[in-house]
Image (cartoon, grey):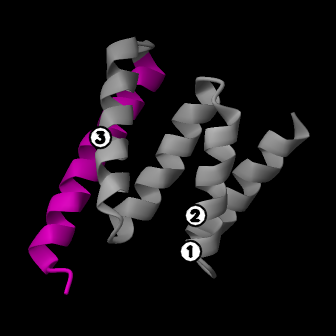
Amino acid sequence: LYSRSQEEKSQAILFQGIKSFEEYSQTGKQESLTNAENVFQSLVKEKRGKAYQIARLYLATINTMQGKVDNAKSLYQEVIKDSSGTILQTLAEQALQALEKK
């Protein structure tokens, strides 16, 4: 059973990662991107909850930015497979299509 407090903790961690990612987007500070990447990787390792799927999307985006296209593609494919019928599936499909056009 995945407890509510565990989900809340994951969401708080996810929020920190998103905040770091936004900071990088605004300032270009590499350390913010590294921090975001580390946060998302820790959530992805947990493999549960809604935060996990969102973290995979962000991690795929960071991988794309770093030129790690194969990693990004496999993350997007996992999100598509595990998020059937959700907005996350749609976002991952759109990102994957954009990557494959490059």
In front: 32, or 1?
A: 1
In reply to whether residue 52 is colored magenta, the answer given is no
Classify 10 Å Cα crowding around label 3: few (below 14), some (14-19), many (20 and above): many
Of the numbered discs 1 and 3, the one sitting upstream in the chain is 3
Give the residue at x 40% y 32%.
22
In front: 47, or 88?
A: 47
Q: Identify the image quadrant of residue 72.
A: top right
Q: Secondary structure at mark 3?
A: helix
Using residue 85 as the reference point, say whether residue 48 is left or right of it. Answer: left
Q: Tell me the kind of residue under disc 1.
A: Ser
Q: Identify the image quadrant of residue 65.
A: top right
81 vs 53: above or below:
below
Q: Which residue is mark 3?
A: 39
* Label drawn at residue 79: 2
Task: Please report the bounds of the magenta region as a residue range.
Answer: 1-26
Give the residue at x 53% y 33%.
62
Give the residue at x 22% y 60%.
10
Image quadrant where one finds the C terminus? top right
Q: Position of residue 100 (x, y in %)?
A: 85, 44
Q: Tell me the kind of residue under disc 3.
A: Val
